[in-house]
Image (spheres, grey):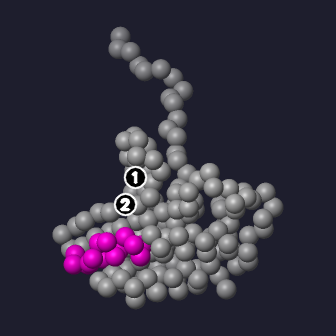
Amino acid sequence: MAVETDVLDELRRLRTRVPRLAGSLAATVDGLVLAHDVPATEPEGLAALTAAALGVAHRMTDAAGRGDFRELLVRGSHGYIATYAAGTTAVLTLLADDRVNVGRLHLEGRRSGARIAELVDARIGPGGGRHADRPATREGAPDPADRSRPIGTLPVRTPQRPAHGPRTGG
């Protein structure tokens, strides 16, 4: 069974657990769709926007000294968009109506993010391909008992210094 099928099953279970959930999408951190349940929304576009928002969220948490990225919540006039870290290689985005219980959304979103992280890491492995149909080989893989990075966090991007100094007028 492909990882996409397992992740889609988790997204469907999530919809049954959260009343007023309008859709869900699991994607890689670089914006490739793993699985989706988002009627009336283009999943590829949403995945790309999620990756862009994730980059901004990473920079904001780093600049504000708030630690590693965990989640992002956006409220619009018609509802919420919530994004949760799903391990180091995936992200979960949820679309919910404006009358959703936000506490329940967070609780179930965090749980599903952790479950998706397990599925992705077990089937593709960190940094693995999108369409892998077999368990990842553990050769050279990090020790799963390593607790240096908490579950559900993503790697921190470090801005590069410019190769040249500032331009001076003259």
- In magenta segment, residue 106: yes
Q: Badge 1 is on which residue?
A: 57
Determine whether, in the image, residue 138 is placed left or right of residue 132: right
Q: Is residue 137 above or below residue 40?
A: above
Which range is magenta? 96-109
Compare residues 40 and 16 and report the one nearer the observer: 16
- Determine whether the residue tagged by mark 1 lies in a helix, strand or loop: helix
Q: Residue at x 59, y 53 (%)?
A: 149
Q: Residue at x 53, y 70 (%)?
A: 114
Look at label 1 and name its amino acid: Ala
Pick whichever of labels 2 and 1 is earlier in the sequence: 1
Q: Badge 2 is on which residue?
A: 72
Q: Is residue 169 above or below residue 11?
A: above
Compare residues 23 and 32 and report the one nearer the observer: 23
Q: Residues within 10 Å of mark 2 (few under 14, many from 20)?
A: some
How many badges with numbers are in the image? 2
Picture quadrant where residue 94 is located: bottom left
Look at label 2 and name its amino acid: Leu
Quick one: quadrant of the N terminus?
Answer: bottom right
Q: Residue at x 35, y 74 (%)?
A: 105
Residue 52 appears in view = no
